[in-house]
Image (cartoon, helix red, strand yellow):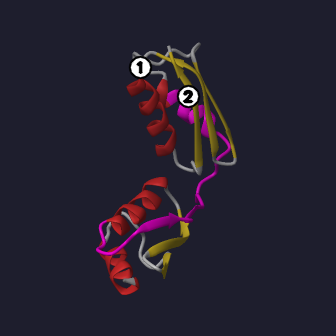
Amino acid sequence: MATAAVDRLAWDTGTPRDVVKVKVEKGWLTLTGDVHWHFQKEAAEREMHNLMGVLGVSNQITIKPRVDTGGLSDDIQHALHPSWFFDEENVHVTAQEGRIKLNGTVGSWQERQTAASTAWAAPGATSVENDLIVA
């Protein structure tokens, strides 16, 4: 199973080569390593769930951005507010060293998810806490 997991990661274009390590124990896979983007962490885990015999996956991959995260909250705020459904008065973004927090209110669950996806897409995002309330 370990060989199949490593081979699957090697073929996956969403995960950088040779950065994710796989440990197998009683059908459970533990993923470790450092990637630069959230989508890379998700891609590695998604590939493991497709392997035959896998009972579960513990994704312990760490996101280590390569960019300066100083202006991250401003970047996300600017990305959200040109949209017609994000009001600058209602959605607030704070960021500290790649950790992003979204606060305020939105009009639907889709808007809440879009805000979180936008935050995750920001260069340097390492975590997103989505505290937006659907009102």
**Amino acid on which the number 2 mark rests in the picture:** Gln
The residue positioned 43% from the left and 60% from the top of the image is: 40
Residue 12 position by quadrant: bottom left
* As drawn, 93 above or below 42: above
Residue 4 position by quadrant: bottom left
Depth check, mark 2 against mark 1: the one in front is: 1
The residue positioned 64% from the left and 51% from the top of the image is: 68
Left or right? Give the position of 117 relative to 10: right
Left or right? Give the position of 127 relative to 43: right
The Cα–Cα distance between marks 2 and 1, rounded to whole angstroms, is: 18 Å
Q: Is residue 75 shown in magenta?
A: yes
- State the residue lying farthest toward the right: 96
**Whole-percent x, y for residue 5 in the image:** 37, 78
> In the rendered image, which quarter contains the N terminus?
bottom left
- Tag 1 secondary structure: loop
Residue 62 position by quadrant: bottom right
Circles 2, 1 touching at the beta carbon (< 8 Å): no
- Identify the residue under disc 2: 77
* As drawn, 62 above or below 5: above
* As drawn, 25 above or below 116: below
Res. 108 mark: 1
The residue positioned 44% from the left and 39% from the top of the image is: 117
**Amino acid on which the number 1 mark rests in the picture:** Ser
